[in-house]
Image (tube, rainbow, N blue to C red):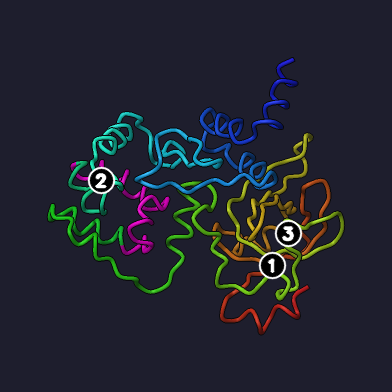
């Protein structure tokens, strides 16, 4: 009976269903929920210091990421203090700037909380330059004056934002990190959203890796959570093969993976890194 009710809710009220699931699931187990949401075209809006609450909430038919789902955020009272401050604001945008947030919250809740919020992109509506914002925060924290945080300039391009967002959220929400790469088909790849049973090459980013084993525990293997431009997929890699490709399989790495797709699982036979300034030299020969 419970299984029937769950299936009925998931089918008829998917946004409400998954919002409730996220609020009652540990962060480490979110990956399967992201896959279901991708498959059902449910949009997860990124965390925003002016719009997010401690819990996941519905927003215009979408799900707004809850701050409870950011790794490093533990205290409900601390976040609800911030949301209570927002409700007392007389402006259309509760927090007007990063320095306004810092001044009104008495320092943003400490280094651990600020690093988690910045890594998750909660201040992107003020500045998209997360690494530079965090470095400026560390400087301002010593002086106690936060005005510098409203004048953040872009620094050299790095993977800081990408890898820290994956670490904080367990996925990528604010962007997929693939904007600067050519279209999947130009790379000789099938978009993940169009995968059908058979042999393919796919392109995307590693989100996480986890070692598993068969029921007999005699055949360990690796599972990579992999995100493309439109969709996510689990990639199966034998442990022996993984040892050859391990250096390429860190979170945030862009890869071209060739293998066979069956039953929502991609069985890898070849993994190669895709480097922006070199892709045109190598991809045609990678198989």
Q: Compare marks 3 and 1 and give the one earlier in the sequence.
A: 3
Q: CA distance from mark 2 to mark 1?
A: 47 Å
Q: Vertically, is 76 above or below 270?
A: above
Image coords of residue 194 (percent x, y): 77, 58
Asked if marks 2 and 1 touch (Cβ < 8 Å), the reply is: no
Nearer-the-camera pick, 236 or 36: 36
Q: Which residues are magenta?
A: 106-132
Left or right: 281 with respect to 127? right
Q: Quadrant of residue 52?
A: top left
Question: Is residue 110 highlighted in magenta?
Answer: yes
**Category of crowding for the residue at label 3, using alpha-carbon neighbours closer than 10 angstroms: few (below 14), some (14–19), many (at least 20):** some
Q: Which residue position holds label 2? A: 91
Q: CA distance from mark 3 to mark 1?
A: 15 Å
Q: Secondary structure at mark 2?
A: loop
Q: Which residue position holds label 1? A: 256
Residue in the image at 82% along x and 46% along y = 263
Q: Which residue position holds label 3? A: 241
Q: Secondary structure at mark 3?
A: helix
Q: Considering the image in quadrants, where does the N terminus appear?
A: top right
Q: Vertically, is 120 above or below 56?
A: below
Residue in the image at 40% along x and 34% along y = 54
Residue in the image at 64% along x and 34% along y = 14
Give the mark toward the camera: 3 or 2: 2
Direction top: furthest residue: 1
Give the mark toward the camera: 2 or 1: 2
**Category of crowding for the residue at label 1, using alpha-carbon neighbours closer than 10 angstroms: few (below 14), some (14–19), many (at least 20):** many
């Amino acid at each position: 009976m419970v299984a029937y009710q769950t299936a009925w809710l998931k089918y008829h009220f998917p946004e409400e269903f998954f919002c409730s699931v996220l609020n009652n699931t540990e962060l480490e187990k979110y990956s399967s929920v992201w896959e279901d949401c991708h498959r059902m075209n449910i949009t997860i809006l990124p965390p925003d210091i002016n719009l997010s609450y401690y819990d996941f909430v519905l927003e215009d038919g979408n799900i707004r990421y809850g701050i409870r789902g950011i790794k490093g955020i533990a205290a409900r009272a601390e976040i609800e203090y911030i949301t209570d401050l927002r409700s007392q604001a007389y402006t259309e945008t509760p927090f007007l700037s990063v320095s306004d947030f810092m001044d009104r919250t008495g320092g943003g809740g400490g280094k651990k909380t600020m690093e988690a919020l910045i890594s998750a992109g909660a201040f992107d509506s003020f500045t998209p330059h997360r690494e530079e914002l965090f470095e400026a925060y560390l400087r301002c924290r010593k002086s106690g004056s936060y005005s510098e945080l409203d004048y953040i300039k872009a620094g050299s391009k790095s993977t800081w934002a990408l890898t820290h967002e994956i670490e904080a959220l367990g996925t990528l929400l604010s962007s997929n990190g693939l904007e600067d790469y050519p279209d999947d088909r130009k790379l000789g790849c099938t978009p993940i959203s169009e995968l059908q049973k058979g042999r393919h090459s796919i392109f995307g980013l590693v989100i996480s890796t986890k070692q598993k084993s068969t029921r007999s525990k005699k055949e360990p293997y690796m599972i990579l959570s992999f995100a493309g431009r439109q969709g996510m997929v689990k990639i199966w890699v034998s442990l022996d093969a993984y040892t050859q490709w391990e250096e390429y399989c860190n979170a945030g790495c862009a890869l071209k993976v060739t293998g066979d797709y069956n039953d929502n699982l991609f069985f890898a036979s070849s993994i190669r890194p895709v480097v922006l300034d070199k892709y045109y030299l190598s991809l045609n020969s990678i198989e």
